[in-house]
Image: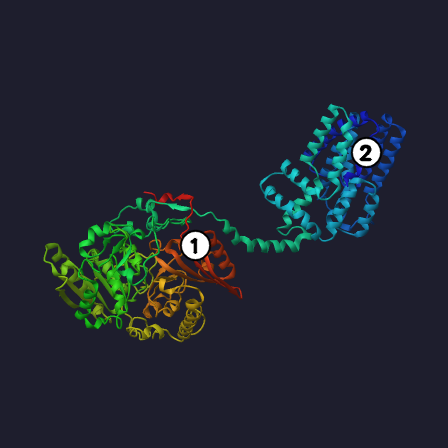
Amino acid sequence: MALGKYSRVDGKKSSSSYCSTVTLVVFVALCLVGVWMMTSSSVVPVQNADVSSQENKNEVKTELSEKNENNASAESNTNNESNTKQFEDNPGDLPEDATKGDSNVNLTTQEEKNSNSQENSDVPEKTTEKITEEVQDEKSKEKPEKQNEEENKSEDASENETKNLEGKKENGGSNPEEKDSEAGGESNSGKQGDSEEGLIGDKSNSDEGSEKSDERKDVFKGNGQIEENVEQKEDKESDSNFSEKKDGEKTKDQASTEVFPSGAQSELLNETTTQNGAFSTQAAESQKEKGAQTSSEPEQQTGYRWKLCNVTAGPDYIPCLDNLQAIRKLRTTKHYEHRERHCPEDPPTCLVPLPEGYQHPIEWPTSREKIWYHNVPHTKLAEIKGHQNWVKVTGEFLTFPGGGTQFQHGALHYIDFIQQSVPDIAWGKHTRVILDVGCGVASFGGYLFERDVLTMSFAPKDEHEAQVQFALERGIPAISAVMGTKRLPFPGRVFDIVHCARCRVPWHIEGGKLLLELNRLLRPGGFFVWSATPIYRKLPEDVEIWEAMKQLTKSMCWEVVSINKDRLNKVGVAVYQKPNSNECYEKRSQNEPPLCQHSDDPNAAWNVPLQSCMHKVPVESSERGSQWPEQWPARLEKPPYWLLSSEVGVYGKPAPEDFTEDYAHWKRVVSKSYISGMGINWSTVRNAMDMRSIYGGFAAALRDLNIWVMNVVSVDSPDTLPLIYERGLFGMYHDWCESFSTYPRSYDLLHADHLFSKIKNKCNLTALVAEVDRILRPEGKLIVRDKVETVNEVENMLRSMQWEIRLTYSRDKEGLLCVQKTMWRPKEVETVTYAIA
C-alpha cells in the first residue's frame, strides 16, 4: 500500500532542515497530483508504471543523496529497492483478476496522494516534479496489492504482501483489515455497522467533498494503525519551527479532508451499497437488512405526531361534507349540490377535537329519550322544533318526547296508524327494512325497533342543526345524505318501505327525478308512505303539488293503496305500492317516464348521477326482486331463493353453501370469542359497524343483542349488499379512501375484517386510522382481524394515539386485535385550510 513509504521517509528525519524541505516539496507535489487527477481521464498502465517508478525512484535517491548523509541515503536506497520489489507485477503472487481492471487505481492514487502529503513534508522543492512522477508510478504499483486486499483473493498473495510489508507501521495497520475482509465480512460488521449507519444518509445527500472524508476517517480509526501513524507523524514534526509546524498542519488537514484514507473511503462507499446488495462479502446480511427494514416500517408510525384538526365545524367535522373550499366553487346549489359529498383529494390525518364536557353516552334504551347536552351541544333545533316534540333542553340533558312534525303525539301511535291503514305492511314480519327520508331526529326509526323493524334514516347536514347527530347519539341508525344529483349509496330493489313525513323533498318537479330514485330503491310490491300537507290541506300550493303527484305516480304505475287521516295528529297519510310486474309499463299510452336502458344497472350507486327512468321489474323466478323475501326472522338464516348453487360464492364454494358456512363461522366467532373473550361489556354497545361486510354474518350473529350493525360493502369488493338486505339487515356502499358520511363519535364498536390490508395498498392508511378515530366514540372498541404485519402496523399507530390495547392474538400469520379508544387528544393543532369558512 501507499502507506509503505512512511518507513522510507521516516528514516531520513535526522535533520530538521531536511524535514522542512520535504514538507514544502510534498505540499507542492500534492497540489500537482491533484491537478493531474482532475484533468487526466486515464490511468497509467500497471506495466509502464513499474518501469517509470524505478527510474523516478533512482532520480529521487540521487537528489536526496546530494543533500543528506551517506547513511541516510543508503537507508533510502534500501527502502526504495524494497518498495520497488514489493509493487512489481508478479502474476504468481496475485490472483488473475487483480491486474485486470483499473477500478481501484484511482482509489489507490488518492491513498498514495494522502500518504505523501503527510509524510514527505521535508522533501526539497527542486524534487517536486520527480516526486510527482514517483507518486503516480507508485500508485500504479500499489494497485495489485490494493486489489488483493479489497477483493480478498488468495492467502498466498496475502502472506507474501505481509512479508514484504513487515516492519512497516502503515502496512501493519492494513493487514488486520485484510484478515477481517477475508473472514467474510461478519467480523467487520460490528465495527463497521455504526460507522456505516452514519455514512449512509450523508453520502446520499452530499458530493465527494470534505464531509465524506471526515466521516470515513472516523470509520477507519477502528482498523488500528492509520490513526496511530498520523499521531506519530504529528509528534515527530512537533520539534520543527513555527512556520514548518503550520505548513505541516495545513498539509495534514488538507489530506484528511481531500483524500484520507481514500482506499478505505471507497470501500465504505461500496459497503454502504452492500445494504442494497452490492458488496459480495455483505450479500447475505444485506438481504436480512432489507427484510428487517421492511418489517420495521410499521414501527416508524409509532412516532407519528398526531395533531388536532382546526376546522370551522370543530368537533362536528365531516371531511367530505365540510369541504368549504370545494363548496364555494360550485356553479349552482339548485339541486342541493352543496349538501352532497365533496371529498378532499388528500383526506385529513388530524384528529377531531371532543366537545367540552363530553362524557360517556347514555345507554340504550334510555338514550332514545335523553342524551347528555354537552355531547351534542346544539339548541337551535330545540328552539325551532320544540313545540313539535322533536327535542327539548332539560337541564344537562336534551330530551326527545318521541314526536315529529307529523306525529306530535308520539311515533308509536303514528306507526300503528300506518299499519291499520295498510295491514299488508305487517311491521316486523312482511316489512323488515325501511328507508326514512328526511328523518329529522329519527324518532320514527327509533320506535320502529319495538316493531322489530330496521330503519335506515338519512337527512342532510343543513340548517336543522345536528339532526342526524342527535339520532346517532340516541342510538338510532342514521347517515348524513341528501337527495340531490346522485344516486343514494344503496343497491336497487332492497327497501320494503320508503317513508317520508314532511321530508321537504320536491318529488313532483323535473319529471319526478327524485321520486324515480325512490322507485329504484323500492322492492317490487313495496310501499311508499308519504305524510305531507298536500294530502290533507287545500291551500293552492298544496293542491297544485297533490295534482302533480297524482299524475306522476300514475305514470309510474304506482297504485294508491290508502289515503287516511290520523285524527289524533291531524295529518293525512298516503300509501303507494310499486308494481310487481311489467304489465302496467307495457300498457302505458306514453313512455313517460321512460324505461331505463337494459345496460343501466340499478345496483350501480357510487357517485352515479340520477337517471329519469324506471327499471323493469324482474320476472325470472331465479332473479332477485321477482319474489318477496321470506318473512322475518326466517329470511335472516335461510339463503335467498335467487342464490344459486351454480354460482360461486365469495369464498369459492357454491353460493348457498358459502352463505351458510359464513353464517356458521360468525356465530361461532361471536359466541365463543367476541362475547366472552374480548372483555367487552356488550350492554354498552349500541351502534356498531362492520367496516368490510361480506354476507352480513357478523351482524346476523349479534341479532339477539340490543345492537344494530351498519354493514359497509367496499366499492371495490364483491357486491354482496343486496344479499345483506335480503336477510333483513342493512348497510351501504363506501370507499374507505374517503371519510364516511357520519358525524364524529357515532359508533360504539367498529369491526374490521381484513380491511386495513386491502386499503393500505391503494390509499393512505394513516388517514383511515384517523377516520376510525373520528367516527368511534371515546371508550369505544375496535376489533381488527387481519394479517399479522398489518395488525402490528395498526396497533402501533393506535398506541401512538394512547388507545388501550385490550387483546392481541396471532396464529398462522393471521392476527386479532381489540383496542379501546381513550379520551386523549393531541395538543398540537393543524389547520385544515379547505375546511375553514
Residue 224 vertical placement versus 726 (above, below)? above
Residue 2 vertical placement versus 297 (above, below)? above
Mark positioned earlier in the residue sequence (2 or 1): 2
Q: Which amino acid does the dot numbered 1 rest on?
A: Val
User: Count the marks: how many?
Assistant: 2
Q: Which amino acid does the dot numbered 2 rest on?
A: Asp
Residue 48 at least partly seen: no
Quadrant hosting residue 142: top right
Q: Quadrant of the N terminus?
A: top right
**SS class of the residue under badge 2?**
helix
Q: Quadrant of the C terminus?
A: top left
Give me the disc on residue 10: 2
Residue occupied by mark 1: 769
The percent coordinates of residue 785 (x first, y second) are: 46, 63
The percent coordinates of residue 788 (x first, y second) are: 51, 61
User: How would you rate the neighbour count of disc 1 (Cα within 10 Å): few for under 14, some for 14-19, many for 20 or more?
Assistant: some
